[in-house]
């Protein structure tokens, strides 16, 4: 524990940069945007289907853009890349505040998902994985804690602002926080970090950067395809569950206020499990821990399918929190361990894109099945068995890679 705090004390500027970037990126996450859904639908007279289609379409387009653009973090100075992402997120908040037509709403959703869900966490986690080696897991978990903190704080802020000044005006407030708070804080932290934030990573003299394997090599590696279902299962399931939580409440006969209170537990468990996973990654490596990701997620699905009672909501949200908490440090460190850090931005942008595609697909798929009258037991039981299958496949991927072969690949 003493060494942990020594690491934090010596590296706090860069760690804080990762944390604040991911915290502000929550503006583009589904859990935050969902609090505006009813207000937007009422203002624009949209049905739930039309609203969901616009949201999913914008998410899908943003995932394709980040696949092409995210690799620029390997060639641009960190400060320039982070500044561009901040400008985009500011424009997203302004566009949403002014959205009075479907095209404008689509533009707002596209920008907020591209920059908030995509570029902000992409920038933070790529930086953590690139500049920390022995403490990579802890760095990733510390920066990723911006998500659970946001899950606890930001919904309360959104509800308060919507009640006090209206939903459009609240997006103006969010927009102003970026140039007035985030950008000055980001510049101040990077100036104090032990890196040259004005130099492109690939211009570094570190030869390890130039021997790294990139996106093409990863896509030709069969182990990647065996691990992919496990990596994207969490975002896919979580978004589908959150967007259609009304279906779950009706099927399980839960009190909505009780489920809302369980979100607080979810946020706390998310944070604690993320911090613990960071320590475990540094001790055991991410590739060896990768198979455990599926265990709490499968447990969450099976509990939702076959157990009844109000207490199941608490168990379900706890297991989801564990899954999301451990996934970020493990998968974040995995790509650096196996493929190196020189082209990490390109690799992470692809993975961010695939995760966003998964989050755009699950609301539509779940919605179609719900419209056809599927029961919760069938829906979530099938999802659970699918996750178990993903867990079987992942055992034949990176965990089988020996330390010697890992060293050769890197």
Image (cartoon, grey):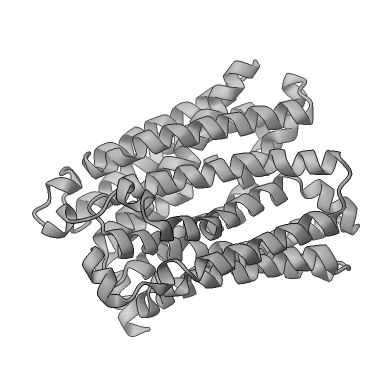
348 vs 140: above or below = above
Horizontally, residue 229 falls left or right of residue 239, namely left
Question: Which quadrant is the N terminus positioned in?
Answer: bottom left
Coordinates of residue 171 in the picture (x, y in percent): 57, 31
Q: Residue at x 36, y 51 (%)?
A: 220
Residue situated furthest left in the rendering: 205
104 vs 391: above or below = above
Q: Residue at x 44, y 31 (%)?
A: 90
Coordinates of residue 399 in the picture (x, y in percent): 43, 72
Horizontally, residue 154 falls left or right of residue 178, namely right
Coordinates of residue 51 in the picture (x, y in percent): 71, 28
306 vs 402: above or below = above
Coordinates of residue 318 in the picture (x, y in percent): 67, 68
The image quarter in which residue 255 lies: bottom right
Q: Residue at x 29, y 76 (%)?
A: 403
Horizontally, residue 125 falls left or right of residue 167, namely left
Horizontally, residue 314 falls left or right of residue 186, namely right
Q: Is residue 158 in sight in this rendering?
A: no
Question: Which quadrant is the C terminus positioned in?
Answer: bottom left
Residue situated furthest bottom in the rendering: 2
Q: Is residue 409 in sight in this rendering?
A: yes
Residues 372 and 162: in front is: 372
Q: Residue at x 51, y 58 (%)?
A: 231
Please state the total of marks drawn on the protein image: 0
The image quarter in which residue 338 lies: bottom left
């Amino acid at each position: 524990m003493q060494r942990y705090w020594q690491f934090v004390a010596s590296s706090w500027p860069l760690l804080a940069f990762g944390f604040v970037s991911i915290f502000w990126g929550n503006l583009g996450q589904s859990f935050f945007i969902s609090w505006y859904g009813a207000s937007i639908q009422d203002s624009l007279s949209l049905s739930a289907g039309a609203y969901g289609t616009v949201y999913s379409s914008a998410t899908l387009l943003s995932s394709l853009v980040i696949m092409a653009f995210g690799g620029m973090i390997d060639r641009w100075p960190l400060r320039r890349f982070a500044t561009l992402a901040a400008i985009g997120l500011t424009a997203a908040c302004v566009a949403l505040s002014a959205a009075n037509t479907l095209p404008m709403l689509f533009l707002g959703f596209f920008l907020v998902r591209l920059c908030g869900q995509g570029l902000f966490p992409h920038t933070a986690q790529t930086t953590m994985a690139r500049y920390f080696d022995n403490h990579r897991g802890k760095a990733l978990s510390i920066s990723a804690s911006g998500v659970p903190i946001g899950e606890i704080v930001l919904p309360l802020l959104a509800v308060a602002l919507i009640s006090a000044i209206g939903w459009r005006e609240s997006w103006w407030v969010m927009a102003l926080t970026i140039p007035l708070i985030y950008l000055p804080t980001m510049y101040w932290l990077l100036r104090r970090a032990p890196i040259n934030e004005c130099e492109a990573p690939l211009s570094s003299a570190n030869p390890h950067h130039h021997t790294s394997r990139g996106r093409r090599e990863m896509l030709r590696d069969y182990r990647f395809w065996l691990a992919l279902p496990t990596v994207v299962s969490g975002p896919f399931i979580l978004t589908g569950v959150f967007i259609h939580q009304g279906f779950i409440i009706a099927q399980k006969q839960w009190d909505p206020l009780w489920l809302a209170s369980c979100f607080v537990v979810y946020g706390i468990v998310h944070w604690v499990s993320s911090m613990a996973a960071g320590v475990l990654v540094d001790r055991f490596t991410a590739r060896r821990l990768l198979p455990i990701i599926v265990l709490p997620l499968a447990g969450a699905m099976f509990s939702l399918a076959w157990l009844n009672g109000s207490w199941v909501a608490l168990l379900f949200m706890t297991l989801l929190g564990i899954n999301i908490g451990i996934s970020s440090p493990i998968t974040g460190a995995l790509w650096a361990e196996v493929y190196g850090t020189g082209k990490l931005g390109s690799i992470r942008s692809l993975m961010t894109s695939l995760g966003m595609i998964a989050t755009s697909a699950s609301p539509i798929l779940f919605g179609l099945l719900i419209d056809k009258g599927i029961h919760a037991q069938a829906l979530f039981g099938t999802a659970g068995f699918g996750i178990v299958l993903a867990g079987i496949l992942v055992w034949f991927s990176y965990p089988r890679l020996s330390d010697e072969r890992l060293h050769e690949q890197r």
